[in-house]
Amino acid sequence: MKIKREPMKRISKNSNFIAGAVLTGLILLFIIIGCIHTPYDPEAMDGAGRFAGISWRHPMGCDNFGRDILSRVMTGAGTTLGVAFATVAIGAFFGVIWGAFAGYYGGLLDEIFMRAADAMLAFPSILLALMIIGLFGPGKYNVILALGIAFVPSFARIVRSEFIRCKNMDYVRSARLMGAGNLRIMFVHILPNAFPVILSSVLIGFNNAVLAEAGMNYLGIGVMPPDASLGRMLSEAQTYIFSAPGYAIFPGIVLILMILGFSLLGEGVRDN
Amino acid sequence: MSGQERENFLLTVRNLNVFFDGKAKGLWKQKEKIQVLRDVSFSMKRGEILGLVGESGCGKSTLARTILHIIRDYQGEIFSSAGCSQMVFQDPFGSLNPARKVGWILEEPLKNKGGMEKDERRQKALQMLKRVGLDEKYADRYPRELSGGQRQRVAIAAALMLEPELLIADEPVSALDVTIQAQILELLLQLHKEMNLSVLFISHDLRVVYQICDRVMIMQKGHIVEQGETGAVYENPQAAYTKELLAAAGFSED
């Protein structure tokens, strides 16, 4: 018989999970504080303070319009996280439904669903999102929609393989004998067994979404000025990379920490 | 067969044939048909324990699945007067949903049936747990926290939640230790008496079948080669295959 370890003990030995949780927790705390209070109005310009260096009054300095970078990083990180969250939610929701039907029913339905997914996966997700933006026009909500759609097939693949693994298990046969319908078997019996895998890919998806959001903003099609987002700030900072390196460094550091946190958390969940 | 005769039996199977698709030999050729069950005919009385014995791969599980309509593609006739039939699977590590607690697993059949309040369902689940010899506290455990024997008790309890008249037990003790086997067999016998449960007991182990079955059928390559009262078959086997099996299991021929 397998000896079962207590979940808490397992987690306490999982250094990836702990490091990821701590890092993500700190970033979330930073963002939450940013929602409630920022040292300065992130959109307030101050002509005299252009490219102000690091000081007690402006711990990260000021940008080309004299806006406080710390304040903008705080709200910008929130925007980036929000976009990433919405994107992953859309991708995971439709991906789960898509993959569940394809994996559970198999046959022709599976073939059609998965070839469609392959066609979507054949394009880089940024390119696919750019095409959708081309159709609907730029803006925060269109970026969410575009990236969300681009994320659906990768979730569908993962969920499909989990459903294929589970659908021939005896507990599924037994559930059918006991009167459960197909939808109930799919979403009440099988889906909970796919949760660990879905959770881990949600966390990895978060990373990709944060990066993709930053990438879209860098291309100038995401959040519209004067709103802040980490990608937007990086894109604006590139002109002043030598004269005011702080403008690019601080948003970059927060972006990296955010991604690192989610990566470690994702690996930790997978190892569990 | 008259309706009167049908009434007397819980289950009657006539000339049952089941084919599976084999591999196609060429790209354009039709798939080869493999015959899994050949002309299977038998009747099962109410309240008896009927044994089905044969080597693994001989079609025992296929027969069980066809009776339960898990396999729908068959030729022949199956008459069942049992209001509800349920199955206990061989491997108690695969037949219980690992993501759900024991209490949930037991309540699930009642939920699907409908017409019962939450408290009532819970009450019934706890009663059934006691009935199969498990403490109520196991309702809040996950299957992985239970031993093989305990899990098989839960699987039996889940199968009995809908009060079936026919229980098909497909190798229910083969995955268990010998000492645990005896306990589960004891439990099945006890439930059989208490609930007037008819059991189709599938096994490859002639000793186990001898312990609990009233009648026994011997199956070879999808065909039933011999059936009769357990004592008669074991003492005076007719088919060569039965003699072979009995000799292999260490039953002397005198």
Image: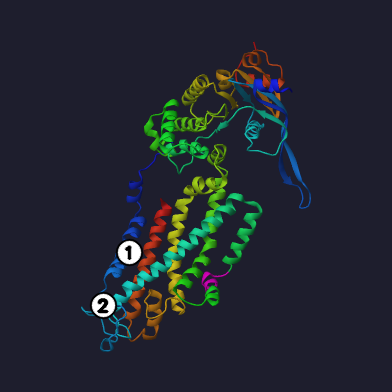
- Spatial CA distance of label 2 from label 1 is 20 Å
| Residue, disc 2 | A40
Give the letter of the chain under mark 1. A
Position of A115 with respect to B125 (left or right) is right
Position of A23 with respect to B97 (left or right) is left
Rendered residue at 49%/39% (across/down): B111
Furthest toward the bottom, the residue is A48
Position of B59 with respect to B170 (left or right) is right
Position above or below: A23 against B210: below
User: Where in the figure is residue A204, as x and y percent of width and height?
Assistant: 44, 61
| Residue type indicated by callout 1 | Leu
Rendered residue at 52%/56% (across/down): A96
Q: Are marks 2 and 1 on the same chain?
A: yes
Q: Nearer the viewer, residue A220 or B123?
A: B123
Q: Quadrant of the N terminus of chain A?
A: top left
| Residue, disc 1 | A28
Q: Which residues are magenta?
A: A123-129
User: Where in the figure is residue A48, as x and y percent of width and height?
Assistant: 26, 89
Location of residue A135 (image quadrant)? bottom right
User: Where in the figure is residue B108, as x and y percent of width and height?
Assistant: 48, 39
